[in-house]
Image (tube, rainbow, N blue to C red):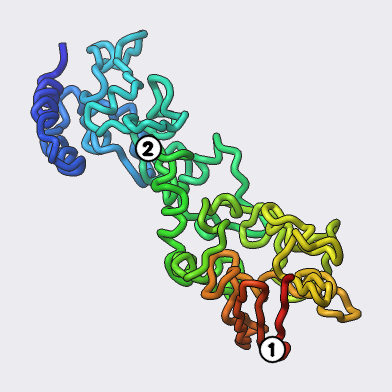
């Protein structure tokens, strides 16, 4: 026989199920206002005081001593004996959904939701030192207990570096997006990268407003796709959370076996940097002079004997978006000094001028 309190609770829930507009918080508040400890609950903490001692968060029924809402104890259990079956212990998720809204209705479910006792894999039914009654000292600790995710590397995503919780980006139960993301991945990234951000591992660097770059007149084709095509979401052995190396230096030594711009050549053909047989590999060439201008800048270091002074891709191009065609910057920075770059394209070539040299024109035949 169920206590009268549980019958009242069941009646309240039946009524509430027909009120779709009522928020979950309001529903729980109404349930809590009707939930009270019964006479049979009083002696529970004489033996079970450890459930509420020295903890930060207590499940509401536990906190008010309303044990009978989840357990039914026979007299022999309350009298100090504990034969098998003397107290009901219902560990199923369905028992949790008597009070809590369902968390398993999204088309994509967290694997931890599988099984009848799914809630208790992550949550403690009575109390915890951690918010959300977690079975760990942090959300990150709970997630990495199952998920093998690296949280250290040469570059770390700001939320990971700052110890922010996984649920900043992921929903922990079920949802509509792959990887249980809270939004489509690009939309999720731009919900933070819609402003200038101070880099977490190097406070002297400002990560530019990426959303703004994607509204410029010329967008890098790679940036029109998914951010995760080029970046990893947690940590990376490469700078800028990239999936392949990319030098942030202004000058570099280039070779096909020591490629400081490997991320670029996951899409682009490295033959664009060869000194000869390049006619079909790059549009940035001067046919009358028989010179590959990509090779000249990046590999030949504009004719400098010191080939470690090869010009970096980032001097001329922005990997997200830029105001000039071919994703060409209008300004780049030598340390903190701005250097103007003006480019004009023609049908058979183009011309460029900046602080490094006077007006230069190239022509394709």
Quadrant where the N terminus is found in the figure = top left
Mark positioned earlier in the residue sequence (1 or 2): 2
- Please state which of the two labelled residues, at mark 1 or mark 2, is closer to the viewer: 1
Q: Is residue 256 visible?
A: yes
Residue drawn where x is 69% and y is 56% of the image: 268
In screen coordinates, is 195 left or right of 291?
left
Residue 312's spot in the image, x, y percent? 73, 72
Residue 128 image label: none
Q: In terms of depth relative to the viewer, which is nearer, 38 or 188? A: 188
In screen coordinates, is 114 left or right of 81?
right
Describe the element under mark 2 as helix, strand or loop: strand
In screen coordinates, is 295 left or right of 124?
right
In screen coordinates, is 94 left or right of 201?
left
Residue drawn where x is 14% and y is 28% of the image: 13
Q: How far apart are the alpha carbons under marks 1 and 2?
A: 55 Å
Residue 82's spot in the image, x, y percent? 34, 13
Considering only vertical position in the picture, is 119 above or below 193?
above
Residue drawn where x is 82% and y is 70% of the image: 299
Q: Residue furthest front?
A: 365
Residue 359 image label: 1
Q: In terms of depth relative to the viewer, which is nearer, 135 or 324? A: 324
Question: Splitting the image into 4 quarters, where does residue 26 fall?
Answer: top left
Residue drawn where x is 66% and y is 55% of the image: 153
Residue 321's spot in the image, x, y percent? 53, 67
Residue neighbourhood size for the residue with mark 1, other residues' Cα within 10 Å, grouped as few (<14), some (14–19), many (≥20): few
Judging by the rendered image, the residue that carries numbered circle 2 is 175
Residue 42's spot in the image, x, y percent? 20, 28
Describe the element under mark 1 as helix, strand or loop: strand
């Amino acid at each position: 026989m169920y206590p009268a309190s549980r019958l009242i609770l069941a009646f309240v829930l039946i009524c509430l199920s027909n009120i779709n507009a009522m928020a979950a918080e309001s529903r729980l508040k109404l349930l809590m206002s009707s939930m009270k400890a019964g006479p049979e609950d009083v002696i529970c903490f004489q033996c079970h005081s450890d459930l509420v001692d020295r903890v930060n968060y207590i499940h509401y029924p536990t906190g008010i001593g309303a044990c009978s809402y989840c357990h039914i104890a026979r007299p022999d259990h309350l009298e100090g004996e504990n034969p098998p079956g003397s107290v009901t212990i219902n560990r199923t998720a369905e028992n949790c959904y008597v009070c809590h809204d369902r968390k398993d209705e999204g088309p994509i479910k967290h694997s931890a939701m599988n099984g009848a006792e799914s809630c208790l894999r992550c949550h403690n039914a009575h109390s915890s030192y951690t918010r959300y009654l977690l079975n760990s000292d942090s959300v990150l600790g709970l997630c990495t207990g199952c998920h093998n995710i690296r949280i250290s590397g040469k570059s770390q995503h700001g939320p990971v570096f700052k110890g922010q919780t996984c649920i900043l980006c992921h929903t922990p139960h079920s949802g509509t997006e792959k990887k249980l993301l809270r939004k489509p991945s690009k939309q999720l990234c731009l919900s933070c990268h819609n402003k200038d951000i101070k880099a977490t591992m190097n406070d002297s660097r400002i990560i530019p407003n990426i959303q703004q770059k994607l509204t410029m007149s010329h967008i890098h084709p790679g940036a029109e796709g998914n951010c995760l095509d080029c970046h990893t979401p947690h940590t990376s052995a490469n700078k800028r959370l990239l999936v392949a190396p990319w030098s942030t230096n202004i000058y570099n030594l280039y070779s096909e076996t020591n490629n400081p711009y490997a991320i670029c050549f996951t899409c682009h053909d490295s033959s664009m940097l060869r000194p000869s047989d390049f006619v079909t590999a790059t549009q940035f060439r001067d046919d009358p002079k028989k010179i590959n201008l990509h090779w000249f800048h990046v590999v030949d270091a504009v004719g400098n004997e010191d080939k470690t002074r090869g010009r970096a891709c980032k001097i001329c191009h922005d990997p997200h978006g830029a105001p000039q065609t071919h994703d060409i910057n209008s300004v780049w920075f030598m340390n903190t000094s701005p250097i103007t770059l003006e480019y004009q394209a023609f049908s058979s070539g183009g011309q460029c001028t900046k602080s490094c040299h006077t007006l230069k024109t190239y022509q394709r035949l």
